[in-house]
Image (tube, coloured by chain):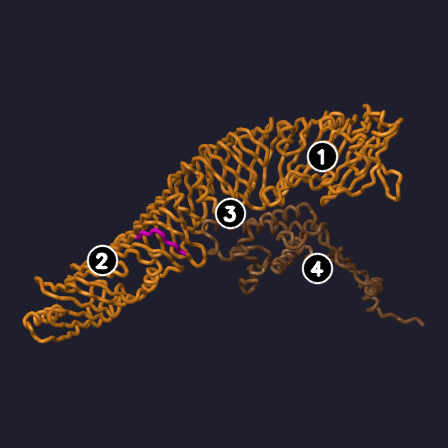
Chain colours: A orange, B brown
Amino acid sequence: MQKLAVLSLAGLGAIAPRAPAQEITVDVGAVAGPSWRADNITLTYLSPSTLRLDVATVQWAGRVAATKLQAHCSTRFVATELRCERGRFSATIPGWGRLQGTLEGAFGSAESWRARLEVPRHGLLATLEQSAADMNIAVRVHGQKAEDLRKLAAAFGQGVPGEFAGEVDLTLGATLGPATSTATLEIDTRSLSYQEPSGRYAAENLAAHGRARWDSGPQRWTVQAQGRGGQVYAEPLFLDFTALPLTAEVVALDSKDHWRIEGLHLRQGTAGTLDATGLISKAGLRLESAELAFDAPALAPLFATDVQPFLIGTPLDGLTAEGTARGSVSLRSGSLTALTAELSGVALSAGRLGLAVDGLSGQVHWAGAGAKPSFLQWSTGNIGRIPLGPSEVSFRAQGRELALLAPWRQPLLGGAVHVQRLALSKVGLPQLDADFRGALEPIDLAALCRALDWPVFGGTLGGQLPGLRVQNEVWSIDGALEAQVFDGTVRLENLRAIEPFGVLPRVAADAHMRRIDLETLTGTFSFGRITGRLDGDVEGLRLLDWKPVAFDAGFHSTPGDHSRRRISQRAIDNISAIGGGPTGLLSRGFLSIFKDFSYDRMGISCVLRDGRCRMDGIEPAPPQDGQAGYYLVKGRLLPRIDVIGYTREVSWDTLLQQVETAIASGGPQTQ
Amino acid sequence: MKRAISVPTLLALFLCTACVTINVYFPAAAAEKAADRIIDEVWDQGAPKPGGSVVPPQSSLPSRFLVAALDFVISPAHAAQPDIDISSPEVQRVKASLEARFSSLKPYFDSGAVGLTGDGLVAVRDPNGVPLAQRNAVKALVADENRDRLALYQQIANANGQPQWAGQIQSVFAQRWVAKAQPGWWYQDSSGWKQK
């Protein structure tokens, strides 16, 4: 019917030459195609050969695509179709405003027509062609502001929250058929920025290219994308494409509730690749299941970009990794169900925990159930400042359990930690349980002192550690360590680590010293020669950052010891200086001819709390100036020297400083 | 003439004298003073004073006399010495960690990217105010700061022998952090984010 009307109009024009200008209007009504519909169409013939088309509304896929469409062109007939040449058109597109441009086309019937529209101002070129049942659309937009496109998409119901800045080049090709359709969209951008209101997604100066193809038959998306430059933030991942360009290929099937990822391939620079399949549910964009395989010849940038952001706020925060790794990960309902990793020459460093390992190789398997044995070996490492030697360990990691499959020997400081049995359960929960049996093969104390920045002394430290208990974040080690130092013994019992993975890791122990040879001790530290033997008990010793912050300490001459007890001038001066008393008294006058003096007993005690040391001696001394004193050194024979202290409370830092000064000085000044 | 005291009255008096309560009151005023000292030192405001404990002023003479008279009849409820000790090495260590981190956090407080929450912690308020490359670093700073703050409140409670006070100390600090916040900083109350 419409074809007849158009033909008649055209015919009229042809057979009425040089007639005065006339206008003939035909009301065509509505026209519909397979996926589009136009309402309120009027065709106006203006002599000599201009045809004008007015359409009130054009709908596409059920939505209003254009209103007040007006087109006019010179027409002529060629064969059975009406050609439109040198045409112009204008239309109002929702979300975009009024467009004006040139138009060319040909109309045969509702099932056979084509049109070419160009809007120079927007860099837009569109060709539409309807042949038989298929409609082919090609749209090309160059240099279009991304924000304008977002508004356009929003007007068509595809809203994207947030704000864009920058320009994109878009190419869209589609074939819409009665049963199936395909569409391909290509987007290229050189400098795109985006901010999503909640801050979870953002992009800056993004240079990227993407190509997405939709096949409606199998409901399949095929996407290729490259990020060439700029930065993208998709919480918690931060991707810098300038440093690490990304190539992605995805094939996904779209069903009503899910996207099934048939194949995802990601390549980040030359650092590594990730291949994955999975299922994402559309409600809430939840990852239902996924199988990933990663291959990282250069682990450092990949680990920093893809893994570290997920560790923020956990005890492994700040973990870095270098080397080569390969492996696979399985996820169900968004949580990990299995992990396998093959490591080669990996260096791990957990700054927060003070742990590091180098030259790490092996295979790690973890699964919720039925995990295979794991095996790791490393060449060096350190716990805090204590260096570790090469070692290897085989274990099974399953669910929340970790168990050694064979005894483990870790060499350190000239000796070794020997773990005969270790099985942890409920790892990561407060009710962590440990089954442990181990021993410390004697280590070199001098090396330990150097590692912990303590004053260096020689000897060995070792012992049996038959058990481990964990309660309320206090790890208590059964057994005791014994050291042979200064020809005496030091026994460390009641060893505890308090909140070792928390904010304030502390170490606690009770120390008992017996028969320490003072001559060797004072000789090593250049304190001034004292002979005799010393016993000591330090209960409740608590170390924070490996420095003492609390203890109940008492030292006294070994009872029943009959070795010679002599104390030199310099030692007396130093003890006096530490107590805040006068020095140099003995270097003047008559007593200066005696280089050392005999003593009966000596002793000192200090209770350290909150930075202050409450001091006491062997026994009370007669008060002086109303102040009660205590004997630090009780003399014997003649000349008799007693050192009496009166200060009860001393700042611990001051005390340490005075001891250091005494050791460092070459002796009191003589006048 | 002997005045008879009825049995119920006698019973009541007997029961009263048998009541000996030992209450450990949370010393809110002392806690506020201690919190202010710590906050000043962490945020570098005002001169830090040496020393450890804060003791509230003694009550005046007439009221003490009155209290003593009552004490004679009914055994008093013994209150623990109201005093908040913050000199323990653990508290000092956590405070040092907070002080060291403040110089990194301050620009984000100033820009409004990070704000103070209503429960004594910090949170990222405006992620879009942080350049992309720094967003994860800010998240880590906030996580570390909150871990330290929770440890601070617990260690103050432990130092005073009352680990169960940690929650109340956290509430006191929550209020004092906001009170001492610099103008322009953001804080959270029951109705959302507000700017000082």
First in sequence, mark 3 or 1: give its number. Answer: 3
Q: Which residue is mark 4?
A: B29
**Quadrant assignment for the N terminus of chain A:** bottom left
Magenta residues (range): A187-194
Type of amino acid at the residue the image marks with label 4: Ala
Chain letter behind tag 4: B
Q: Secondary structure at mark 3?
A: loop
Tell me if label 4 and label 1 are in contact, CB under 8 Å: no
Q: Which residue is mark 2?
A: A137
Q: Which residue is mark 3?
A: A312
| Relative vertical location of residue A516 with respect to residue A221 in this rendering, above or below | above
Q: Is residue B70 left or right of residue A76?
A: right
Count of labels in the image: 4
The span from disc 4 to disc 3 (Cα, nearest Å) is 37 Å
Tell me if label 3 and label 2 are in contact, CB under 8 Å: no
- Across and down, in percent, residue A573 comes to 80, 32
Q: Nearer the viewer, mark 2 or mark 1?
A: 1
The span from disc 3 to disc 1 (Cα, nearest Å) is 41 Å
